[in-house]
Every structure is written in structure tokens, then in C-alpha cells.
Amino acid sequence: MNLANKLTILRILLIPLFILALLLPNLWPTFSPFSHWVAAMIFLAAAITDILDGKYARKYNLVTDFGKLMDPIADKMLIVAAFVMLSCTTDAVHPKYLLHPVITIVFIAREFLISGVRQIAASKGIVIAAGKLGKWKTTFQDIIVIALLLYDEFPFFYLNPYLRYLIEALVYVTLALSVVSAIEYIVKNKGALNLHDC
């Protein structure tokens, strides 16, 4: 197994650690002040593996069927886990969810929709590459996950409502990118879907 695929597997293995970091304060309250920091670092490490595995595979021409299948699955597993945890996890130090559940539903629905489109295309032997808007969407998603996790960890930031407004604006920009990139993805690849046969 090449390094790119190992990085993909590592990304998947980091997901339960990310979840555990956010759930652990409910079982071990003394860990609570550190939970968001640890979760953010784990998520950042996982996001970095996403960047590295693709670059490594392309540079050394190591694109494999396993990588084509598991890399996007690993990406979706990571971001879905992050959004679900941000929408429901609370503890004594962080007694509220950080992302509105409706926004999480839209993000997750988008991922399922695009996965379905890719699966239909793949069944016809068509490989659809991610578009620029989709890549921007992923970058913004990674940013808001870390921003939401760490925002309350800096008391002097918490006193500045404008920073909170900025983070909320980033969330809605990411939401817009998710919807627009999904529409663009479907429109550009409607030929692969054979919508006229529906």
C-alpha cells in the first residue's frame, strides 16, 4: 500500500479520536478545558492528510482504485463527523452546540447528493473531478470547524462580538458555497446522469 493510501486510512482512524475528544469531558470533566483544543488539533491533522495524500498520489502517479474510492469517502466521513459533533456536543465548559443543526443537515445532504452523482457516473465508467467551487467549499468547511471549536477558548476574543459575526458570516458563506457548488456540479455533469431518461 502506497503512502497516499496510508494517509487516507490515517484520516479515517483520526475520526473516532476527534469524536472522543469532544465526548470525553462528559465522562472526565477535568478534560473539558482541553477538549476543543485537542479536537481542533486532531481535525487539523486529518485535514492536512487530505491535502498531502492527493498531492503525493498525483506527483508520483500513484492513483489507485482504492484511493479513488476511499479518499472522497474519508473526506465525507471526517466533515460529517465534525458537523454532527459541532451541532450536538455540549459539556460543563461548553454548554451549547456550536453549529445550528439545520445548517448541518444542509451540509450533509449536499455530500450525499454529490456522492450519489459520482456513483451514477462511476457506474458508467466516468470519473468526475472536483471543481474549483467544491475545493473552496472544502477549505471553508475546514476553517469554520476549527474556528468554531476554538472561538470560546480565547476570552479576549469572546469579548469582541465582531469576531463572532465574522465566524457566523464564514459559516453562511460556506453554506452558500456548498449549495452553489452542488448545483454547478450537477449542471456540468448532467450528461453523465442522463436526466432525460428519468
Image: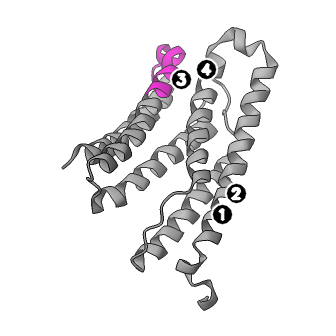
* Distance Cα–Cα, label 2 vs label 4: 37 Å
Name the residue type under label 2. Val
Which residue is located at x 39 percent, y 77 percent? 125
Which one is in front in this view, the residue at disc 4 or the one at disc 3?
A: 3
* Distance Cα–Cα, label 4 vs label 1: 42 Å
Is label 2 in contact with label 4 (beta carbons under 8 Å)?
A: no
* Distance Cα–Cα, label 4 vs label 3: 13 Å
Q: In the rendering, at what x and y percent does residue 189 appear?
A: 57, 72
Which of the two discs, 4 and 3, labels the residue nearer the N terminus? 3
Q: Which residue is mark 4?
A: 92
Task: Check the image and report above or below for 30 versus 19.
Answer: above
Which of the two discs, 2 and 4, labels the residue nearer the N terminus? 4
Q: Which residue is mark 3?
A: 36
Name the residue type under label 4. Ala
Which of the two discs, 2 and 3, labels the residue nearer the N terminus? 3
**Residue 45 is one of the magenta-drawn residues:** no
Is label 4 in contact with label 3 (beta carbons under 8 Å)?
A: no
Q: Which mark is residue 180?
A: 2
Is label 1 in contact with label 3 (beta carbons under 8 Å)?
A: no
Task: Check the image and report above or below for 3 versus 121.
Answer: above
Badge 4 crowding class, 10 Å Cα cut-off, few under 14, some 14 to 19, many 20 or more, is few
